[in-house]
Image (cartoon, rainbow, N blue to C red):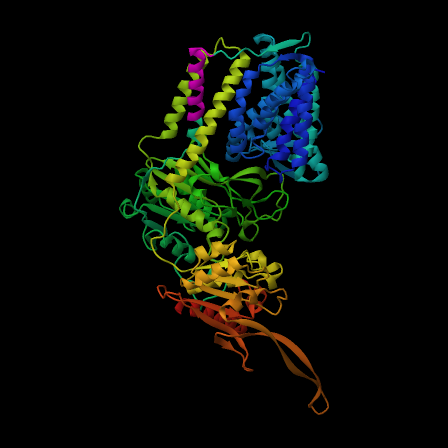
Amino acid sequence: MRRILWLGAFLLSSSWLFLIPQFITPNLPAGLLCVLFGVLCFIIGISSVVTPQPNLRYLVLLFPLTIAALLVPFPHNLGVILLGLGLLFVLLCYRFERLQAIPLGISLAGVLLLLQTLIFPLYVSLASHGHRVDVLASVISPIANFLGFHTSATNGFLFVQTLQTTPFTITWESLGCPLALNLFLAGFFLLLLFSKTKQQMLKNTIIFLIAGTSYLLLRFIAILSLYLTTTELSVFWDPLLTTLSFLPFSLLLMKLIPLQKHETVTIQAPSIKMTKKHLATMVLLILLVSSLTAAFLYHDPGVKKTGRVLIDEYHSQWEDTLRPLDTEWYGLLSTYNYYSWGRWISYHYPVETNTNETFTTSLLSHYDILILKCPTESYTTQEIQAIKDFVTHGGGLYLIGDHTNVFGMNTFLNQVSEEFGIRFKTDASYELGTGDLSVYTPDRSYAHPVLRQVPQFEFMTSCTLEPTSLSASLQMENIIIGNRLISEPGTYSTENFFRESIASPDSEYGYLLQAAAITYGAGRVVAFTDSTVFSSFCLYTDGYPAFTLGALEYLNRSNSPAPLSTILFVLAVVLFLLIAYLVKNINKTFLLWMILFSGLLAFCLTAPLCSYLTDLSYQPTEAALDYPTVVFEQQHSTVNISVKPTASLGVTSTNYGTFYIWTQRVGLVPSLAPTLHDATTNGDVIILINPTRAFTETDVKLITTYLEHGGRLLLMDSITNPESTANELLGNFGLWITTESTNKPLYTNETENGSLTLQGNITTPSLTITGGTPLLISNDNNTYASMVEITNPDNTKAPGYFVVIVDSASFSDAQMGGTFTEPTDQQRQIYNTEFFLLRTLLSS
């Protein structure tokens, strides 16, 4: 039964495939089931290998474990949770000798999961920096040919010949390394615990490595064969299939390395008697873990600069910032540009555009941040050197590319970016398995400073990044590592260089780098991969404004003279050597307790401190100029507001994306507010569309106070909104919506003499407004838009204004069209009505 420990280690290692969103949305039932059976295997295996003798004083470890379980997000806290449960079971099983394997088995499973959690960030970073293992193509090809395949290896690709020749890239993911890495760590963990001598451990380690490496290669060939049969790329990454494909390896290990075959071991937990040596070791352990934690999580605040921004238009004919988004110019290019983005930056920083000069050291010396976006022309050698000098002396460089090297922009960007160790790849990324647009949600506690104010970020098809060298990889700061992604190489055979397939065997998938930063000399560089998201038609959604300001806030600093992260790493190495010297003769169990207690305590203290200090250093950027805002309240409104180009393909009668974007044409900055409170706090103008949720007394008071302090409110309702709650609010301000019926005669066309014959009539319902000052009146004298002025009781504030209109359906995308629409005369009339209402509110 002792061999079952290998099966337990395999199940615990497999659980991460289901719990972590690397390839799929987390499948918690499957993942937790793996953990449960893995723990059971550990309990059974431990009972046949060891006889534990617990020491209740070790329960003091529960203190840092509890804090860590709360501090670390699920599922990464599974290890500390299991370890804590194991210690609690010590209390329950203390007097029952036969049950003492239960707490030990749970605790050891927790330690294993904790170790795997520790290497997880390193794996994510390294995997996103380089997926391909080109050298293995030449190794796998002869093995596959020996097994009956027809393959060849060229330039890192494995070409497989069937009815056609198919290129395959060999990646860490297709080899199964996400699971294999955890299995290897679990194997070393078990060998360290249960090897009787160093010679035995060395022998078993060699067997383990040889068996594991051989199995990885043979497994890849087996999965390759399965792909050729099914043509389903998911065979390389599907968690269930991956788990099943590694099951034989765990069974093989049970045969090859049985773990303490001939005797039972007794684990005696030594008493906790602290000597000066032990205390010194624990202090050093706390300093070591604190240093490493701070080196990864603390971000240098640097020295803040003036913030003078230069946007380069001289090298770019795409996404320009020059022509205004106004009420006369429509069509694709009117919104597929960076005009609104440039204005958004200008509200916070002094901005200039370069339209007619090549870069020189003299030109760049007048600025703190240089933005190179979507270049369509190359840079000269002299310009590249000027940019390098600019960054070296403390400048901030913002590089913005896009998918598939469209217009050659990534090629031109790489002329500059590769000088700093970053390469824009010529690919396109999608959500793995669906091909949809990808969404990234940062963990705010551990996020890069660029993302501190970004709740969510939805990409519109990005390329990906990679470091140009190992040293660049070690220096690179990961801003966004997307998960559940697939990267398809671009092609010059289609429009915009997109491939027809989004699941090819030469693609890369899993964790992909979509935004990164690197320090160079006294300056900083940020590279971003999806230029579309800053276009005027979608800028003010999905965290894009916050990302823009976060990137500029980060770049508007020169680096501190002494690189703190380097100092902390050097300190960690020195501390590690000192600890290694001190722990030579310390009991293994006691040492493990010391490492766990000191390490968890240090992390629990240092991680929140680093997060706090980063927040303190990188505060939200305050606007230097006032700008009018309009907020679309979502708590009571029932419409959808999507600005994605694909929104026009859905139900457009309930989508108001174009209406939302058109507010920018009259100078407003739009945003969405999930609650009425957020809207009244942040909006100069609030818009409610088709309300159906009841307005409480608190809601009415909130709106009244907002209007009495000079706020503006536009309420839009429709006859198509039968559950409207608008009158619950309007009645408090002397307004009311009523239903009118209009009789319209119906005629038949007498074709012989061309005359019309009255046959009857039809009654058409519509809404009209009573109260207030009419703004829009129909030819039958019904009021379709009305306004009331709300004065402050003590006349100390400017009055507020409340406008209501009862034809909201006319402003849906079904009537207004999309943001790229060339409008008809009727649509222009609808547009002008929107502009009239907004200007009336702003000018009142």
**Residue at left offset 68%, top offset 10%:** 261
- From the viewer's side, name the closer residue of 155 and 605: 605
Which of the 4 quarters of the picture holds residue 172? top right
Establish if 105 lies above or below 173.
Answer: above
- The quadrant of the rendering that contains the C terminus is bottom left
User: Quick check: 500 above or below 78?
Assistant: below
Asked whether, in this view, residue 681 is left or right of residue 390, the answer is: right
Front residue of 168/101: it is: 101
The answer to which quarter of the image holds residue 263 is: top right
- The answer to whether residue 318 of the structure is visible from this angle is no
**Residue 753 appears in which quarter of the rendering?**
bottom right
Query: Does 289 appear in magenta?
Result: yes
Position of residue 111 measured from the top left corner of the image (x, y, whole percent): 58, 22
Tell me the magenta residue range: 274-291
Please tell me whether residue 511 is drawn above or below residue 578 in the rendered image.
below
Name the spot of residue 241 as percent of width and height, x first.
69, 33
**88 w.r.t. 717: above or below:** above
Q: Give the total number of marks visible in the rendering.
A: 0
Q: Left or right: 64 with respect to 261?
A: left
Q: Main secondary structure of the magenta part?
A: helix
Residue pictured at 53% horizontal, 76% vertical:
783
Looking at the rendered image, the quarter that the N terminus falls into is top right
Q: Residue 99 placed where, x, y %?
A: 68, 17
Q: Is residue 737 part of the magenta span, yes or no?
A: no
| Residue 198 visible in this rendered orientation of the protein | yes
Question: In the image shown, does 60 or 600 lie closer to the viewer?
Answer: 60
Q: Residue furthest left?
A: 362
Q: Residue 695's spot in the image, x, y percent?
A: 55, 60
